[in-house]
């Protein structure tokens, strides 16, 4: 099960690890305040993934400034790390927030969730199930009972992979929680049989460790499914309606830019995701929706309900900030 790793590849993967290993710090002053020039300051927690591209585009293209906002981005390793800070008002918004986690928190009453804007929807190969180049696993059906790495248990990755395998009549694997930066090393050491990696880690693991794609994680019933969004609390929207609306407009304008000009995303990625410009050219991008769609979210909720991740169906429309 040996994987090939070049010296330069090791350095690039180490850069990804360093980028994603950041944790939420320095937010004690609060997630929302006013700056000296009158702009409202927002602290936004975000992962170094392709999901966050619209956030960085909105900042770097002046779209937040146009709305009178000064957005400060705080990198995190998992979006769930930022939930306590969101509840305490130490961050205003969580970007690239995995919908599954936050819809579960909403159902449990832990979070009075509001969705400011959609992040991404699943597109082909924006995440893949990867195996070593010499792995004995040759088809999705071979995954039954095997150890597969996912970033968070019982979340969007296992949800969608289960749906794909169920549709093919294949057995399900056993999931192991391993953060994205550690998936490559875990695969190399044989700690897992496969890794369900998202971009930009997906492309990095393939190119630097010689892994191959066993299954397209963006195929079949996963295709087009909402994966992440920009989430906040009902309390934030109530207290800062102008900022909430301005943030939504800026992100949706940036998503429109990302959808119409993928090159803008590929240029932006090396600035925050710690990937090289060459890597950015080959990364498979997700779909960047320009407006939130309740019907798409209902599809996700139904799938969560079918797999036991939610106890009941509900209408997501009231959660959307319009």
Image (cartoon, rainbow, N blue to C red):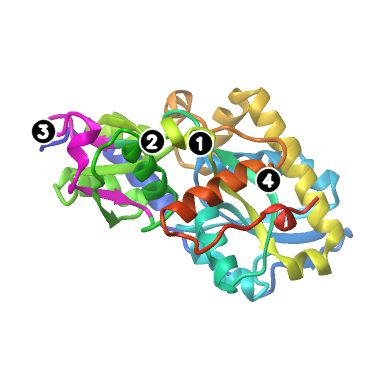
- Residue 217 disc label: 2
Q: CA distance from mark 3 to mark 4?
A: 42 Å
Q: Position of residue 123 (x, y in %)?
A: 50, 31
Q: Is residue 250 left or right of residue 279?
A: right
Which residue sits at x=43%, y=37%? 200
Which residue matches tag 1?
Answer: 122
38 sits to left or right of 250:
right
What's the CA distance linking mark 1 and mark 4?
A: 16 Å
In depth, the one of 114 and 244 nearer the eye is 114
The residue lying at 18 percent from left, 47 percent from top is 146
Q: Quadrant of residue 137?
A: top left
Q: Tag 4, which secondary structure?
A: helix
Residue 145 within the segment the image draws in magenta: yes
Q: Residue 314, percent across and down?
A: 62, 58
The residue sitting at 43% across, 24% down in the picture is 282
Label 3 sits on a secondary structure element that is loop
Task: Please state which of the two labelled residues, at mark 2 or mark 4, is closer to the viewer.
Answer: 4
Distance from label 2 to label 3 (Cα)? 19 Å
Q: Is residue 259 above or below residue 170?
A: above
Region rendered in magenta: 130-151
Instruction: Specify whether residue 149 is painted magenta.
Output: yes
Disc number for residue 294: 4
Q: Residue furthest right?
A: 38
User: Closer to the observer: label 3 or label 4?
Assistant: 4
Q: Dots 1 and 2: beta carbons under 8 Å?
A: yes
Q: Earlier in the sequence, mark 1 or mark 4?
A: 1
Q: CA distance from mark 1 to mark 2?
A: 9 Å
Residue 136, disc: 3
Compare marks 1 and 2 and give the one earlier in the sequence.
1
Of the numbered discs 2 and 3, the one sitting upstream in the chain is 3
**Of the residues tagged 1 and 4, which is closer to the observer?**
4
Q: Secondary structure at mark 1?
A: loop
């Amino acid at each position: 099960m040996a994987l090939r790793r070049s010296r330069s590849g090791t350095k690039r993967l180490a850069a990804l690890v360093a980028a994603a290993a950041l944790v939420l710090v320095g937010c004690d002053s609060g997630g929302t305040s006013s700056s000296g020039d009158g702009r409202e300051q927002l602290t936004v927690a975000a992962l170094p993934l392709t999901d966050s591209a619209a956030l960085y585009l909105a900042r770097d293209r002046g779209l937040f400034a146009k709305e009178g906002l000064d957005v400060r981005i705080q990198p995190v390793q998992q979006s769930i790390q930022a939930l306590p800070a969101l509840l305490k008002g130490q961050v205003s918004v969580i970007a690239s927030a995995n919908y599954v986690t936050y819809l579960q928190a909403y159902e449990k009453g832990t979070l009075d969730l509001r969705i400011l804007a959609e992040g991404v929807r699943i597109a082909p190969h924006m995440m893949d199930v990867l195996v070593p180049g010499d792995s004995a696993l040759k088809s999705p059906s071979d995954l039954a009972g095997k150890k597969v790495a996912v970033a968070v248990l019982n979340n969007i990755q296992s949800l969608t992979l289960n749906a794909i395998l169920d549709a093919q009549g294949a057995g399900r694997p056993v999931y192991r929680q391993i953060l994205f930066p550690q998936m490559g090393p875990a695969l190399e050491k044989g700690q897992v049989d496969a890794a369900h990696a998202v971009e930009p880690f997906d492309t990095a693991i393939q190119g630097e460790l010689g892994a191959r794609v066993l299954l397209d994680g963006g195929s079949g019933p996963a295709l087009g499914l909402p994966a992440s969004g920009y989430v906040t609390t009902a309390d934030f929207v109530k207290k800062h309606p102008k900022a909430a609306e301005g943030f939504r407009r800026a992100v949706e304008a940036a998503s429109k830019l990302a959808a119409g000009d993928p090159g803008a995303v590929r240029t932006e990625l090396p600035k925050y995701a710690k990937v090289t410009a060459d890597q950015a050219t080959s990364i498979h991008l997700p779909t960047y929706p320009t407006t939130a769609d309740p019907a798409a979210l209902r599809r996700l909720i139904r799938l969560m309900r079918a797999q036991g991740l939610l106890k009941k169906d509900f209408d997501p429309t009231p959660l959307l900030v319009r």
